[in-house]
Amino acid sequence: MTLRVGVIGTGMIGQDHIRRLTQVLSAVEVVAVSDIDGARAAAVAPQGADVYAAAGDLIRSETVEAVVICSWGPAHEEQLLDCIAAGKPVFCEKPLVTTAAAALRVMEAEVAFGRRLVQVGFMRRFDADYRRLKATLDAGVLGAPLMFHSTHRNASVPEGLYTSDMPLNDTLVHDAYISRWLLNDEVTGVEVRVPRRSRRGGELRDPVVVLLHMGSGALVDVEISVNIAYGYDIRGEVSCEEGTASLPLRPATVIRDIHGVRQPVPADWRERFIEAYDQEFREWIVAAAQGTATGPSTWDGYAATLVADAALRAAESGALEPVRMCQRPSLYGPTLEAAR
Amino acid sequence: MTLRVGVIGTGMIGQDHIRRLTQVLSAVEVVAVSDIDGARAAAVAPQGADVYAAAGDLIRSETVEAVVICSWGPAHEEQLLDCIAAGKPVFCEKPLVTTAAAALRVMEAEVAFGRRLVQVGFMRRFDADYRRLKATLDAGVLGAPLMFHSTHRNASVPEGLYTSDMPLNDTLVHDAYISRWLLNDEVTGVEVRVPRRSRRGGELRDPVVVLLHMGSGALVDVEISVNIAYGYDIRGEVSCEEGTASLPLRPATVIRDIHGVRQPVPADWRERFIEAYDQEFREWIVAAAQGTATGPSTWDGYAATLVADAALRAAESGALEPVRMCQRPSLYGPTLEAAR
Amino acid sequence: MTLRVGVIGTGMIGQDHIRRLTQVLSAVEVVAVSDIDGARAAAVAPQGADVYAAAGDLIRSETVEAVVICSWGPAHEEQLLDCIAAGKPVFCEKPLVTTAAAALRVMEAEVAFGRRLVQVGFMRRFDADYRRLKATLDAGVLGAPLMFHSTHRNASVPEGLYTSDMPLNDTLVHDAYISRWLLNDEVTGVEVRVPRRSRRGGELRDPVVVLLHMGSGALVDVEISVNIAYGYDIRGEVSCEEGTASLPLRPATVIRDIHGVRQPVPADWRERFIEAYDQEFREWIVAAAQGTATGPSTWDGYAATLVADAALRAAESGALEPVRMCQRPSLYGPTLEAAR
Amino acid sequence: MTLRVGVIGTGMIGQDHIRRLTQVLSAVEVVAVSDIDGARAAAVAPQGADVYAAAGDLIRSETVEAVVICSWGPAHEEQLLDCIAAGKPVFCEKPLVTTAAAALRVMEAEVAFGRRLVQVGFMRRFDADYRRLKATLDAGVLGAPLMFHSTHRNASVPEGLYTSDMPLNDTLVHDAYISRWLLNDEVTGVEVRVPRRSRRGGELRDPVVVLLHMGSGALVDVEISVNIAYGYDIRGEVSCEEGTASLPLRPATVIRDIHGVRQPVPADWRERFIEAYDQEFREWIVAAAQGTATGPSTWDGYAATLVADAALRAAESGALEPVRMCQRPSLYGPTLEAAR
């Protein structure tokens, strides 16, 4: 009844997931660890866990029932294909892979296997606020969704490490994924507009406004501000035919003092989404114990790659850049037309 | 069509009302002014207005159609009786009078006159937030009101001038009046509790908690904090059988900055209630032009006096001090039993 | 000390302004009325007011000191030119005029006259919420404004009377004006996107999303939804370098009942902006009594015309349509570069 | 590393805790179950768990490392004493015991044992909102707490099962516990006021207002409404010398529809506090694995008993009923005077 997991990649996020799998969650244990830095892997491995030099060996180990991939993006494709070849459920941190071609190869392998094995780390879907928002929309009483206003603000980003492409190929993926999920829809085109630049980010392209054109005709506008100083602020409002539904403020103490009536804002994504990460793994463990996966799929990882590519093109061209996805394999659910 | 008004008392509040009557409101002009300080009266009188040494002469002047009393409390009784004797509508700043006996004498004179002439300056009734709150209650869909939580906070009070009696005989009158009006009810008893003292007010009895027992059995609890530093904060929630109704936050810009998501709080009662003062006089002018008064009446001023007296007794005794009002003259509306 | 006003046009809005000028505001009286429907003019004229068959005669009447124009748009140019020729202050309901060429002619006449005489009826600037928002921005502590998200929702629009052009040439003008004013900026280009259509409006182009590109580089996105059922909802958030500032919720009773914790939304623009209309005229009266005008100017009316034209072009072309304004006459304030 | 737990009492709450301990939490397993209804115990026992007829046998079983008591109140004393005799950590659902004398006997035994073993099920302390509220108070920037307004509303209570004593001896305990914890204080006296009765509860004494007088002089007022129809609404605001701190609204989707701008309210305590229950056990497991207990103690259970007794007396007498606690054993922390 306890899922035996191997973790590949023991950087910051890998270590956080090891902590989560060993200290927070039930019905799971970390039995193997691998990293290109063997010393680090050995240092962070839980007592009794095996340490592998090669990710492939961890994946094929008989003691490992399911795999968590936290290595860097370019390594994902091979590791995912190994997991599928071994028939083992795998949780893969974003990005799924780094090119559309690689996403198609992983998807082809999974479809050939015939059962979902891959879950991608888009954690917002497991956040209680987003789930309630989606339930409200799905109840249908507000009519069809026509617009989604998504706001994605970071207090700051690491100088030098965070480049002008990253709002579009790293930050935007969360808004794009959640838009597709909330609206039961696909992105068909992307536009990018670059407002007056914030002096806080130097030469960084910040903020940016992204318009996602959806298959249904719904329009998503995303404000991405990554240096806005005051906190990590994720907001969203869906405008429907007969009303709107929005994410609430985070539950923070209401203080009345000389600054007014006020509620603190989360400092960063850890504070904002820590429970979503826990829940994401909780549901993955249940699915993996049954030999499969749940939530964000290879298809969603593929879509994220295409949207990021289109966003980067749109920032250059100033035009509406189309997103042309392949036919959706039935493994990933009914077509949207059927679902709507 | 323009109401000719005489103003008695030209201190801070009198000057503010002169400004209001001459610069803000229509269908009214200030034609006479009186003050025990004749020089001050002359200095603040609008161009063309007569200046009277004696309040009684102003009241009896043929050019004066209606009177505004802003003198100090002990002078009110005689001035009110003069107005009633002259058959002239009169707006009287709070307190109506300073003793229950005086209130009864004014009431007797007005009843003998046979028409309402006196309006007391309880301005909250003219505040849009309180009016919407009452409309919600009167609509009846929440069921009967059972409790009212009233919060009355001042950022600070003038050191030395504001004494320990004043939360109970000066500040409380607003909460008591608005409770009676919101609930269509009368106060039948008063209890006072004194929590741990705020060090900000030195020896001042602050805060205090007052319980008003209403005729219907409804219970009102009032927090009075007069040195709470952060602002002037008036709040109120009525708990009914099937839900509650509350005053909203004041409409202040929502700022997101390093202090959180926040809205400034009003600094003082002027900022909070300036529109209520304007509206109070707007409706008084209409009524006075028809030879009568509207809103808070001599009866309400009488009730305020009794409640303040009971509150002061209750602070000493620690007991439930009864409020025993005389039979309500029909001039002041139907009995509460009939109204409910 | 009382401003003698003549009102041209006695339809719904004209009658409302006559009510305002006679019953609500001080220091003003309506001494003349004109309408192409003479019977209607006679019916709604205040007692003692003159009724003119021809607007020009009203404008030139010696008893008329200032003029309020509420006629239909195509009549405005001639009436404005007449007012300027007579040197009389004039309040003109929107639209100022219906073509850019006409706006230039009015502007030329006013500049030649040498003093502002024309005030245009963009009332949002006089709304307390917008004023506090602007004061917060102008204080500068949030850094430069980079984006403005403006939301403009109507519960419904009159079927048949409200056409698909009107979101862009009638509704948008308010958002465009307030964007220019809040940001101290000019619109340099307009884009329009049309999301999935609401079934509630039939063939009506609703909602629409408008992007206003500002001279500073700031980007404004406007959601216009004119059939959203739940109420009249005007919202706005300015994203700056170090935080944001937003319009608050309207002050409506907070009800807790089976529908949740809730506050009613205004039903229509009258309820939302009635105080702004009063304030708009209050300030106009003061300026007109001094022979001039304040607030929204001929320049603002000219800008509105250009933005509406560009928006209509943009809806057709799908492209970024430029807004090319003439050099700003010094009569209308310093250049923006100087102001910033 | 896995704590082996025995559960006594398998009614609704017992079953919920078994679910929590087996499905939600890590580092724990349920190895034994006992109930006076042996068939029910057998039916709900996890696979492999032993079923005991007698609670005492379960407590003394060598396979049981720690105990969870969910039996009815009158059985608690004996079971707690057995646990202490066996030196085993025990989580005891409220009430700790049903009389002050019993509480003293349990306390005496635990003190004699020399280490905390007992944790009482006051779950609010583990709720994130209350924790943030306390952290804000403890930071000290708002000055000393002077008043606490606590609101405790249930949509409804089971007719016939919920009696007029229960607001005071069952519901109030949560508010009393959290008041003591938030303010670092003890209750020294209790007053009860009974407002106009809600017709929704028939003859039930509902609502009630309770005043808790605290050792520091701080005053707590509690509104208990157990039939208020609209939802389960727990609110709290602490008034301090320089400001206040309050529980926030629960994070529910903000809906704009014909009912206004609104957020749903939790239906019941399960929905409101489910995460607090999880966290309560999470921290208990850590403490129990170390042979001790954390959070609410025998001392807190003793205080709850005294407050409930005083509240029942106060409802009868109408007077301030004193709460006289024994000297606080050092096992339960420093004296309040030292702590403040």
Image: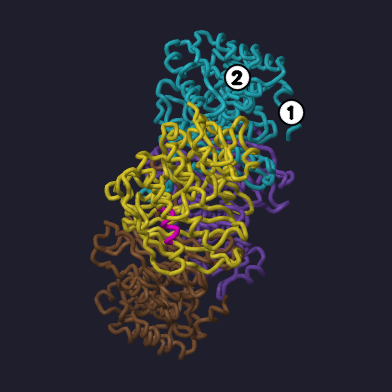
Chain colours: A purple, B yellow, C cyan, D brown
- Nearest the viewer among A43 and D70 is D70
Q: Residue at x 49, y 67 (%)?
A: B194
SS of the residue under disc 1: loop
- Nearest the viewer among C105 and C337 is C105
Q: Residue A293 location in percent, x, y?
A: 45, 56
B228 lies left or right of B296: right
Q: Which one is earlier in the sequence, the residue at label 2 or at label 1?
A: 2
Q: Which residues are magenta?
A: B303-310
Q: Which residue is mark 1?
A: C334
Q: Is residue A112 magenta?
A: no
Counting other residues with Cα less than 10 Å from the Cα at mark 1, is it few (<14), some (14-19), or many (20 or more)? few
Query: Which three-letter amino acid code belongs to the residue tagged 1?
Result: Pro
Query: Which three-letter amino acid code belongs to the residue tagged 2?
Result: Val
Quadrant of residue D80 in the image? Answer: bottom left
Label 2 vs label 1, nearer the camera: 2
Q: Main secondary structure of the magenta part?
A: helix
Check the residue under mark 2 and report the chain it is in: C
Q: Which residue is mark 2?
A: C90
Quadrant of residue B100 in the image? Answer: bottom left
B75 lies left or right of D10: right
